[in-house]
Amino acid sequence: MRRSDDSLTEGERKVLADVAETGVHVVHVEATADTPGHSCSVGLFESFGQPEIVVFGLPGQVAEELIQAVADANDGGTLFLAGSRHEGLLQDYPVRFCAVPDEVRGGLFGVARWAYEDETFPAVQLVWPD
């Protein structure tokens, strides 16, 4: 994980501070012509050994609370890995975790890629019933 220093912007320092303090920073990405809007984690792999998470189709605040719930569960020793199904993250709905292919990971996790200094990290998509 990249180290914070005075050469970084305030936003970059915030990402690293959040990871150091709580284990995760959540990035919200607006939809573009090429990419749907999504929210993703930075720091879960560094902090807990949890693959970084991306979630699509939820309002930013809801997605952030969901990713934070994953971090809280990680802090308790639970990991959410590709191919797994879990109850309890969303009230009354199970969620699944699917592997994010290497060829799309960089485009979805730009801030995480920066924070990890382009080192490889695993990633999963949290899939919720809609």
Image (tube, grey):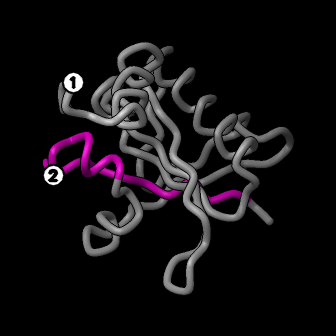
Q: Is residue 1 above or below residue 103?
A: above
* Quadrant in the rendering for residue 52: top left
Q: Is residue 69 above or below residue 86?
A: above
Helix, strand or loop status at disc 2: loop
Residue occupied by mark 1: 6
Estimate the spatial distance between the alpha carbons at disc 1 and disc 2, rounded to whole Å: 20 Å
Q: Classify 10 Å Cα crowding around label 1: few (below 14), some (14-19), many (20 and above).
A: few
The mark nearer the N terminus, 1 or 2, is: 1
Q: Amino acid at mark 2?
A: Asp
| Residue highlighted by disc 2 | 118
Location of the C terminus (image quadrant): bottom right
Q: Is residue 31 magenta?
A: no
Q: List x then y, in percent, for residue 10.
A: 39, 31
| Residue at (67, 46) in percent of width and height | 63
Q: What residue is drawn where x is 73% and y is 57%?
A: 58
x 36%, y 17%: residue: 20
Q: Amino acid at mark 1?
A: Asp
Most extreme residue toward the right is 92
The residue at the point 34 percent across, 72 percent down is 104
Q: Which residues are magenta?
A: 111-128
* Image vertical order of residue 41 relative to residue 74, above or below: below
